[in-house]
Image: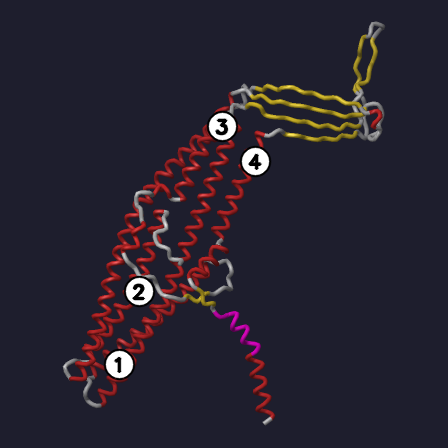
Amino acid sequence: MKKDLSCALKCALFVQILLPIYSFAAATSTNLSDYVKVVESSSPQLQKAQAYLEEQKSKKTEARSAFMPQLTGSAMFLTNKKYALVDMNLGAGTTTVPQIVPTTQYGLSAKWNLFDGFASTYRYLSADENMQSANYEYLWSQFQTQRAAVATYYKALASKLLKQVAEQNVKSLEDHQKDVESLKKAGVATEYELLRTQVMASDAHSELINAEDMVVVSNQKLNELVSADTTQFEVAGDLPVIDESMLAKFNSAKPSEKADLLALQKKVEALEDLHKSARQHWLPKLTAFADYNYYNNRNDKYNDFDNFRESYLIGLNLTWNLFEGFSSYSKNEQAYYQKAQLEKQYVITQKKSQNEIDQWKRKFLYFCSVYKAKNIDIKRSNEALRLAKLGRKAGTRTNTEILDAQADLYRSKAALINAQLGAIEALVSLELSSGQEIYSFIQ
């Protein structure tokens, strides 16, 4: 009795230890909305786009600094010195005078760029357009990430549903095989019917193994979009009902409003302004400056403020770069040809988007027609299976006809799910090609 009680306590303790571990390792049941939120919060692609946007914001701030005055403070203390000597003729012969420099000097300098041929203005406009481009790229990455999460989630859900259909098919064939074996013993069924049933049951088991493998693979794809490796998801719900009416909101005449194309367009405009900025190198530049010094050249003390003196300079500085080895000219040419490259890339991307829109629209309509056809086929297959079973009881149908009806029903169910998934993937690809949210998958 004591031994049995001890075993029971050990088992209870064992369950208490393993239960939290199992609960942690078990997959978390989640819906599409929650999964998309997790993906958006941990997507490396989205985080990269966010970091790039913040970088461009900082560059815009840097470009704005060209319009502001620059203020510099300085402090100098000489620990050792030897004065330079200057010979001066004061009328009574040549006298050598040391050039006394301050031992201690505090300075404040200000500089303000008044005119540089609007080069700073164009650089600022270029930085602003690059920031807008980065913002469009972030929006595009966000849209891509969300749609990738939707497609991956529904692919995992379709794999799960296909596995359920395969399990139902295996169970039905196993039950049918038992019936045929019983009928064969009674002399009603033939060896051919039994062998045919066994072959189809074996194929069904193979299909089930493949469906189980697809579930594992699709679940791994779910985790690939999330940075946390230990997170697991259990998809739930049903695939959305597919219909051509989903295209009611689609406007195929606006491919240029895609966020990635708008980002490219802003980059082209930024390079155009950068090109204009580089072209201003031949214009003179005007700068206002002010320089104030508080110094002590009477003794070597840094804090003897009674002996400190003041000096200042205020003025305008005009500079004109006459020749610099074609450096600015080269920068001008670089900006021009970079702009030309992006302009061609914009044209290529726009044409590709237009072609993809037509391609994915056709695929979506195709899968919609397949979905409707398979819905009808499932009803027909169910009715054919019912009639075959009734006919076998009446002695007018064979087991082979029941098998054929069962196979048709399984293929129709699997084809229906594949048509739903194909339509969803085509619709998501159409959204990515057009840059439009056609259907709100996340309710």
The alpha-carbon separation of the residues under discs 2 and 4 comes to 55 Å
* Amino acid at pointer 3: Ser
Q: Which residue is label 4 attached to? A: 62
Q: CA distance from mark 2 to mark 3?
A: 58 Å
Question: Badge 4 local density, few (<14 within 10 Å), some, or many (20+)?
Answer: few
Q: What type is the residue that disc 4 sits on?
A: Glu
Q: Position of residue 391 (x, y in %)?
A: 17, 81
Expressed as whole percent of the image width and height from the top left, the position of residue 333 reads 45, 28
Q: Is residue 338 left or right of residue 200?
A: right
> Counting other residues with Cα less than 10 Å from the Cα at mark 1, is it few (<14), some (14-19), or many (20 or more)?
many
Q: Are marks 2 and 3 in contact (CB under 8 Å)?
A: no
Residue holding disc 1 = 176
Which quadrant would the C terminus be assigned to in this image? Answer: bottom left
Q: In the displayed orientation, state which residue is furthest to the top.
A: 91
Q: Find residue 417 and name its label.
A: 2
Q: Nearer the viewer, mark 1 or mark 2?
A: 2
Q: Nearer the viewer, residue 406 or 237?
A: 237
Q: Residue placed at 42% from the left, 35% from the top? A: 268
Most distant residue in the left direction:
396
Q: Position of residue 183 (x, y in %)?
A: 22, 87
- Cα gap from disc 3 to disc 1, whole angstroms: 81 Å
Residue at 84 percent of width and 23 percent of height: 298
The x and y percentages for residue 272 are 44, 31
Q: Earlier in the sequence, mark 1 or mark 4?
A: 4
> In the rendered view, would you say 190 is above or below 271?
below
Give SS at disc 4. helix
Q: Is residue 25 magenta?
A: yes
Whether label 1 touches label 4, CB < 8 Å = no
Looking at numbered disc 2 in the image, what kind of residue is underneath it?
A: Ile
Crowdedness near tag 2: few (<14), some (14–19) or many (≥20) residues, C-alpha within 10 Å: many
Location of mark 3 (residue): 277
